[in-house]
């Protein structure tokens, strides 16, 4: 059985409870801004007045003083049967164990904790995980399909179809050749070399630079090939 009890005093009793808590040896500690942890033996010796209206392990503490002030008979005074635990009384013909020191109360709390743990395990079973993964995959497929439709039906993870050479226009730029199979640059000094209109190659050995104007070509030669005969 857990020998520590969590007590949340009533708001109007909080200051008095805190004063009593710091007088204990050792001092009682808080677990939140409004709750204290109290050893079971200290709880049994706590003044009745500071426990009135408190929550003890999540259950409202019913004090004999409070019963008397409200005109209610104390537990057992109305002939209610004392249960085997020796701390709780029968209520409405049922065995109810509200007393925080009652071993049955602790056992019931443990059973509830086991039930909560079993529910958590069931929620993360293989079947549940598989169902969740299936839902994720379905959502991914739907998103990919919608994206493909938005792109005009193009599926992005597929290669583009080959375009016949006849479909290229006269000014089309051919794609680069694969690495390792580059074609040598044409030598504009050779008679058979064909230079398109509006293109002015450097024309010097080991230089394949091309320019759109003669002035640009001449400036390049003077800057990069000053040793060339016509660079000046």
Image (tube, helix red, strand yellow):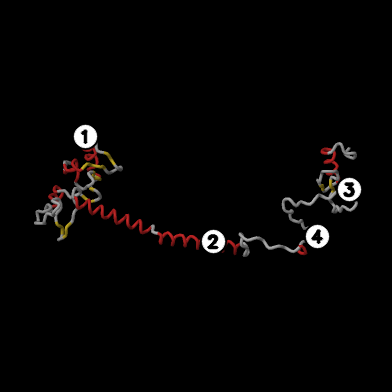
Question: Which mark sits nearer the N-terminus, 1 or 4?
Answer: 1
Residue 42 appears in which quarter of the rendering?
top left
Nearer to us of marks 3 and 1 is 3
Q: Residues within 10 Å of mark 1 (few under 14, many from 20)?
A: few
Task: Pinpoint residue 16: horizontal percent, then vertical percent.
Answer: 21, 39
Question: Which mark sits nearer the N-terminus, 2 or 4?
Answer: 2
Question: Which mark sits nearer the N-terminus, 3 or 2?
Answer: 2
Q: Helix, strand or loop at disc 1?
A: loop
Residue at the disc numbered 2: 143
Whether residues under marks 3 and 1 lie with C-beta atoms below 8 angstroms apart, the answer is no
Q: Which residue is at the far front? A: 180
Nearer to us of marks 3 and 4 is 3
Task: Pinpoint residue 39: horizontal percent, then vertical percent.
Answer: 22, 41
For the residues marked 3 and 4, what is the alpha-carbon distance in whole angstroms? 24 Å
Q: Helix, strand or loop at disc 3?
A: loop
For the residues marked 2 and 4, what is the alpha-carbon distance in whole angstroms? 40 Å
Residue at the disc numbered 1: 25
Q: Residues within 10 Å of mark 3 (few under 14, many from 20)?
A: few
| Image point (70%, 62%), residue name | 162
């Amino acid at each position: 059985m857990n020998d520590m009890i969590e007590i949340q005093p009533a708001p109007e009793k909080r200051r008095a409870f805190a004063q009593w808590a710091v007088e204990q040896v050792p001092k009682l500690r808080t677990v939140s801004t409004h709750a204290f942890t109290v050893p079971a033996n200290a709880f049994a010796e706590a003044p009745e007045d500071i426990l009135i209206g408190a929550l003890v392990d999540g259950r409202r503490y019913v004090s004999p003083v409070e019963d008397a002030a409200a005109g209610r008979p104390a537990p057992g005074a109305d002939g209610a049967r004392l249960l085997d635990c020796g701390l709780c009384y029968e209520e409405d013909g049922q065995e109810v164990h509200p007393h925080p020191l009652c071993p049955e109360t602790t056992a019931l709390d443990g059973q509830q904790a086991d039930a909560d743990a079993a529910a958590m395990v069931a929620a993360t079973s293989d079947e549940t995980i598989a169902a969740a993964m299936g839902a994720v995959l379905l959502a991914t497929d739907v998103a990919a399909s919608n994206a493909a439709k938005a792109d005009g039906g193009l599926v992005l993870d597929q290669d583009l179809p080959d375009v016949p050479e006849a479909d290229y226009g006269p000014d089309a730029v051919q794609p680069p050749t694969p690495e390792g199979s580059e074609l040598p640059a044409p030598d504009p000094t050779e008679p058979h070399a064909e230079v398109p209109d509006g293109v002015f190659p450097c024309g010097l050995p080991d230089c394949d630079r091309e320019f759109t104007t003669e002035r640009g070509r001449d400036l390049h030669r003077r800057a990069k090939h000053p040793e060339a005969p016509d660079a000046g």
